[in-house]
């Protein structure tokens, strides 16, 4: 590759960072990193009515959470209006763009007439300058739009990085408005100037933009700009086959952070949505960068699979070192109003429970019992804290007041009590679980108890 690889993600700040945009950002980022190039963040905020600073902040926070670091930006289109106007003036001067004074009413009538003749509605070229053509007199008081003078013949062809060769006839494209009557440039035009100025070498984006690409290529050509390569990634679908949307559940990256997913797991899962490397399912970021050479992006749409995401996240939780894990779990506990600190005790608790959890939220659900009183269900108490078990619980409680507080000694005390009272392990262990942990199933009870303070265990057994 001769050109320096420069990719970009160009979200519109009209809401949170959608999973689809995050996946496109990930592909663009990984591709740039693979080639030692640059990744750029551009905020497409020309829809002034719908763009908000809050959305920009959310997008940046989500990118940060996913550790998709950008080398340049954020660039804001609204801060580049002078530049767009400068390019429009140049195109008008060079004749690759022209003023059009058709009023909205005239355009409506034009389209109506075309439809009535069974033609596809399109701008009819009234104001398009041609050699030897006399243009209508400029009407007074009509602010003009600026239209791009699209080629009338030939095709636009590009080798799409994802979809392969795509050809669109110029006959399909009419003269696009690049500047509105009030002087604001339009979306497709701003994208072109930005990609040109930012020397973007590869545009990886959702395939909802395929129709924009031939128009953008024509404008880039008119400007004498080097064309980027384009890759259009298929949409992510929900389980019912429709485009993934709020209707299917959480679609904002931030919601996944809140729901207890690890960014590394998210990156791994998102990478596999529409890209593959052999049959590799679990790979870290460095591996992804090493592999992501722009090949093997899937042509067909990927389907969101919540169960698979949970599986991936569970694998990352299991592998995660206890110290950073405790830090994250402490945050989740704090969000519930529990003043947890990420000390060694919390690390040990994470180590004991992380294997059985898919998310940090599930892990925090488990560990809550170490911080706040539990409320066992009356039915479970009735079923397990029976008259047969109660005397054993009482003698165990007595033993627990005096022994060393560690797993082996607690295990030995339980064993002694079982022997004395002629009970089986599950009878005593389940009763202990219900009373101390508030639920009938936990990991090995001696290990679970050892991670409580002695006082907490004694007080939860008090009521026996
Ligand atoms: N702002 C566009 C979007 O959010 C991105 C356009 C592009 O990548 O060219 O879909």
Image (cartoon, helix red, strand yellow):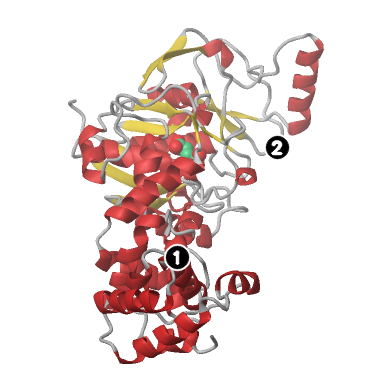
Calculate the distance from the C-alpha at mark 1 to the C-alpha at mark 2: 87 Å
Q: Secondary structure at mark 1?
A: helix
Residue 304 at x, y percent in the picture: 51, 37
Q: Position of residue 436 (x, y in %)?
A: 47, 78
Left or right, 226 with respect to 333, comes to left
Kindly identify which numbered label has been placed on residue 312.
Answer: none
Q: Position of residue 398 (x, y in %)?
A: 39, 90
Of badges 1 and 2, the one in the foreground is 1
Q: In the figure, 97 relative to 386: above or below?
A: above
Of the pair 203 and 184, the residue shown nearer to us: 203
Q: Nearer the viewer, residue 451 or 300?
A: 451
Q: Quadrant of residue 91?
A: top left
Q: Mark yes or no: residue 8 visible.
A: no
Residue extending furthest right? 116
Residue 164 locus on image (x, y percent): 39, 16
| Front residue of 372 and 166 | 372
**Residue depicted at 22% across the width and 39% down the height:** 287
Q: Earlier in the sequence, mark 1 or mark 2?
A: 2
Labels in figure, total: 2
- Which residue lies under the disc numbered 1? 426
Mark 1: give few (<14), some (14-19) or many (20+) Cα within 10 Å: few
Q: Is 356 above or below relative to 230? A: below
Instruction: Locate residue 14 relative to residue 159 in the image: left or right.
Output: right
Q: Nearer the viewer, residue 431 or 249?
A: 431
How many residues crowd mark 2 within 10 Å: few (<14), some (14–19), many (20+)? few
Q: Residue at x 49, y 81 (%)?
A: 372
Which residue in the protein does label 2 denote?
142
Quarter residue 418 falls in: bottom left
- 114 sits to left or right of 358: right
Rendered residue at 29%/52% (across/down): 69
- Quarter of the image where the C terminus is located: bottom right
Q: Secondary structure at mark 2?
A: loop
């Amino acid at each position: 590759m001769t050109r320096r690889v420069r990719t970009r993600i160009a979200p519109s700040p009209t809401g949170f960072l959608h999973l689809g945009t995050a996946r496109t950002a990930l592909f663009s980022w990984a591709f740039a990193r693979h080639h030692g190039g640059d990744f750029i963040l551009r905020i497409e905020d020309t829809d002034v009515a719908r763009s908000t600073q809050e959305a920009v902040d959310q997008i940046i926070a989500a990118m940060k959470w996913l550790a998709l670091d950008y080398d340049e930006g954020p660039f804001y289109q609204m801060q580049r209006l002078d530049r767009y106007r400068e390019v429009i003036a140049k195109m008008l001067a060079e004749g690759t763009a022209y003023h059009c004074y058709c009023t909205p009413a005239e355009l409506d009538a034009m389209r109506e007439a075309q439809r009535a003749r069974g033609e596809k509605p399109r701008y009819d070229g009234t104001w398009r300058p041609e050699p030897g053509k006399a243009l209508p007199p400029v009407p007074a008081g009509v602010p003009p739009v600026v239209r791009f003078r699209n080629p009338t013949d030939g095709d636009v062809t590009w080798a799409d990085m994802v979809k392969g060769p795509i050809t669109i006839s110029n006959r399909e494209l009419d003269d696009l408005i690049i500047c509105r009557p009030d002087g604001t440039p339009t979306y497709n035009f701003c994208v072109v100037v930005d990609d040109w100025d930012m020397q973007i070498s590869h545009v990886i984006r959702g395939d909802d933009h395929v129709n924009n690409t031939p128009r953008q290529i024509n404008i880039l050509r008119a400007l004498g700009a080097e064309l980027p390569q384009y890759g259009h990634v298929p949409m992510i679908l929900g389980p019912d086959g429709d485009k993934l949307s709020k209707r299917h559940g959480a679609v904002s990256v931030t919601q996944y952070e809140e729901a207890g997913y690890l960014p590394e797991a998210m990156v791994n899962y998102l990478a596999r949505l529409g890209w593959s490397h052999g049959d590799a399912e679990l790979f870290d970021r460095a591996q992804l960068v090493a592999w992501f050479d722009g090949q093997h992006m899937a042509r067909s749409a990927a389907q969101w699979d919540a169960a698979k995401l949970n599986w991936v996240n569970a694998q990352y939780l299991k592998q995660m070192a206890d110290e950073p894990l405790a830090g994250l779990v402490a945050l989740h506990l704090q969000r519930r109003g529990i003043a947890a600190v990420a000390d060694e005790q919390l690390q040990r608790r994470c180590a004991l429970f992380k294997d059985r959890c898919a998310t940090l939220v599930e892990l925090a659900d488990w560990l809550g019992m170490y911080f706040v009183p539990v409320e066992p269900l009356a039915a479970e108490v009735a079923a397990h804290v029976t008259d047969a078990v109660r005397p054993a619980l009482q003698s165990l409680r007595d033993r627990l007041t005096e022994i060393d507080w560690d797993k082996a000694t607690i295990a030995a005390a339980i064993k002694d009590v079982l022997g004395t009272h002629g009970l089986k392990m599950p009878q005593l262990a389940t009763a202990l679980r219900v009373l101390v942990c508030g639920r009938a199933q936990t990991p090995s009870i001696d290990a679970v108890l050892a991670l409580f303070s002695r006082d907490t265990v004694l007080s939860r057994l008090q009521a026996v």
